[in-house]
Image (cartoon, grey):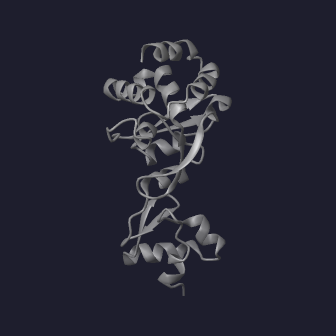
Amino acid sequence: MIREEDLRELVSEDGCLYTSDVTKAGIRREELARFVDKGTLVREMRGVYSFADTWADEFAMIQHRCHKGIFSYGTALYFHGLSDRVPHFSSLTVPYGYNTHYLKKELDAVEFHSIRPELWEIGIMEMTSPQGGRIKLYDRERCICDIIRHPRYVDPQTYYQAVRSYFSSSYCNRGKLLDYAEPLKVKSKIKIYMEVI
């Protein structure tokens, strides 16, 4: 019989226990159900569990369920400190063709955006989320290009705060911003912001 300690050894750094890791370790899925029934484990979402006495990283869990999802727009702006508004939902950008239909019901607090695969890859980076897990998100320059390209995807206050904060900061990388702006087709708008701010 599997002990609780055996499962705790399989918990990832984000505080989650994944069914895939459990089965790789040779443990049957039925054991997870047994620990859920006992109240030791909590089923967070399909294939993702956490121990009832711990705090799992919701952002890492979301990304685990949506492997191609990159945190973007208001969510990424918040992580980068370009917005002080905690987003009401998480924004994920996926490449066109990635099926999110089945995820929309399960991840009801996530807003999905689709983009051409060659544009989806621009500016992906990793960081530690506020809850301690490793996540993928767009870097600052990509975030700025995205909100200038699609201002309707963030509220006006977040938009203006992010743009002002970025262009007046010491980490503003104009060369990198223009490199991203070209394929994202916002170069002329970016140049205007560069001149004005």
Task: Return the x and y of residue 134 as percentages of the image width and height.
Answer: 53, 55
179 displayed left or right of 166: right
40 displayed left or right of 12: left
Question: For residue 159, which quarter of the picture?
Answer: top left
For image coordinates 62% across by 33% down, the residue present is 120
Task: Return the x and y of residue 99 as percentages of the image width and height.
Answer: 59, 39
**Position above or below: 146 against 137:** above
Question: For residue 117, which quarter of the picture?
Answer: top right
Front-most of 145 and 62? 145
Front-most of 176 and 18? 176
If the image is split into quadrants, where does the C terminus sit?
Answer: top left
129 displayed left or right of 21: left
Question: For residue 105, which quarter of the picture?
Answer: top left
For image coordinates 60% across by 40% down, the residue present is 124
**Position above or below: 35 against 161:** below
How many numbered marks appear? 0
For image coordinates 59% across by 75% down, the residue present is 28
Task: Return the x and y of residue 11 as percentages of the image width and height.
Answer: 52, 70
Q: Residue furthest bottom?
A: 1
If the image is split into quadrants, where does the N terminus sit?
Answer: bottom right
178 displayed left or right of 106: right
Q: Residue furthest front?
A: 170
For image coordinates 48% across by 55% down, the residue present is 61
Task: Return the x and y of residue 145 as percentages of the image width and height.
Answer: 52, 25
